Image (cartoon, rainbow, N blue to C red):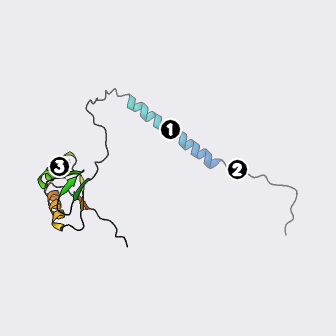
């Protein structure tokens, strides 16, 4: 068992990796500033736009409610099937990725829902969802 003497060795801190990182950062920023100066040497007048439309979010899904008796409503307005087709066609022209959610009454005939699906197919709306809810068990 070695005996400890009164001399304590001082801990050493190796700064070599930190100095390497600092030099790499200095080189990175020096090269980066030279690229921005090269871009400034070209005197380019950028074009201006007057009728730029702001970026907007995707439109909300169109919710089509189908009552038990086959009555169709969109946004609280009752519509015939031909009016619904015009509405969906206009929405599809405004935004090609328009989505439709069909909320059919559970006790109504399924044919009413199929009529809405047929209209969506005719106006080429591909994103169609059938709304449902979990049963209360």
Near-viewer residue (56 or 133): 133
Q: Report the disc number at residue 48.
A: none
Q: Are marks 2 and 1 in contact (CB under 8 Å)?
A: no
Q: In which quadrant will I find the C terminus?
A: bottom left
User: Which comes sooner in the sequence, label 3 or label 1?
Assistant: 1
Query: Would you name the residue on which mark 1 appears?
Result: 29
Badge 2, how many Cα within 10 Å: few under 14, some, many 20+? few
Instruction: Return the disc, 2 or 3, that comes first in the chain's sequence.
Output: 2
Please tell me which residue lies in front, 12 or 104. 104
Q: Quadrant of residue 70?
A: bottom left
Seen in the image, is 136 located left or right of residue 83? right
For the point 52% across and 40% down, the residue is 27
Q: Nearer the viewer, residue 51 or 128?
A: 128
Helix, strand or loop for disc 3: helix
**Residue under pointer 2:** 13
Q: Position of residue 67 (x, y in %)?
A: 21, 61
Q: Residues within 10 Å of mark 1 (few under 14, many from 20)?
A: few
Q: How many discs appear?
A: 3
Q: Is residue 20 left or right of residue 115?
A: right
Q: Nearer the viewer, mark 2 or mark 3?
A: 3
Along the line of sight, the residue nearer the viewer: 37 or 118: 118
Q: Is residue 51 left or right of residue 112?
A: right
Residue at 14% over, 49% down: 86
Taking the spot 15% from the left edge, 66% from the top edge, the residue there is 111
As drawn, the residue found furthest toward the front would be 69
Residues tagged 3 and 1 counted as in contact (Cβ below 8 A):
no
The residue where tag 3 is placed is: 87
Q: CA distance from mark 2 to mark 1?
A: 27 Å
Camera-nearest label, 3 or 1: 3
Alpha carbon separation for disc pair 2 and 3: 74 Å
């Amino acid at each position: 068992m070695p005996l400890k003497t009164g001399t304590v060795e001082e801990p050493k801190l190796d700064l070599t990796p930190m100095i390497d990182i600092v030099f790499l950062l200095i080189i990175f920023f020096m090269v980066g500033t030279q690229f921005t100066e090269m871009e400034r040497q070209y005197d380019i007048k950028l074009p201006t736009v007057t009728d730029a439309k702001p970026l907007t979010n995707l439109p909300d899904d169109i919710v089509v409610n189908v009552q038990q008796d086959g009555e169709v409503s969109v946004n609280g307005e009752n519509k015939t099937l031909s009016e619904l087709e015009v509405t969906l066609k206009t929405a599809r022209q405004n935004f090609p990725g328009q989505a439709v959610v069909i909320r059919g009454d559970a006790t109504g005939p399924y044919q009413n829902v199929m009529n809405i699906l047929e209209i969506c197919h005719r106006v080429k709306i591909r994103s169609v969802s059938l709304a449902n809810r979990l049963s209360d068990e």
